[in-house]
Image (cartoon, grey):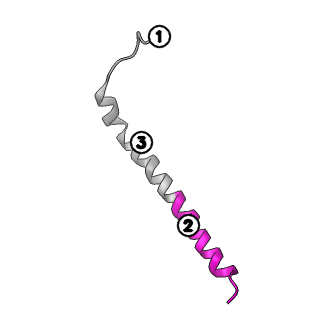
Amino acid sequence: MFENLQFKPMAFVENLKYMGLGMLGIFVVIGVIAGVTVLLNRVLSKK
């Protein structure tokens, strides 16, 4: 089952940029959702 399993530390280092882009994407989506929520609260709130 684990015959082809190899430890390659440089593979982790090479994939850091993709992990960073994924985290950036997550924060961007969270920011957009928070911004839309704030905008909707300001537009639709009764004063």
At which x and y percent is residue 11? 34, 30
Residue placed at 61% from the left, 75% from the top?
39
Quadrant of the rendered image containing residue 40 = bottom right
Alpha carbon separation for disc pair 1 and 2: 45 Å
Quadrant of the rendered image containing residue 37 = bottom right
Residue position marked by numbered label 1 in the rendering: 1
Residue placed at 61% from the left, 69% from the top?
36
> Which residues fall within the magenta stretch?
29-47
Residue type marked 2: Ala
Residue position marked by numbered label 2 in the rendering: 34
Question: Element under label 3?
Answer: helix
Mark drawn on residue 18:
3
Residue placed at 51% from the left, 63% from the top?
31
Residue type marked 1: Met
Viewer-nearest of labels 2 and 3?
A: 2
Question: Element under label 1?
Answer: loop
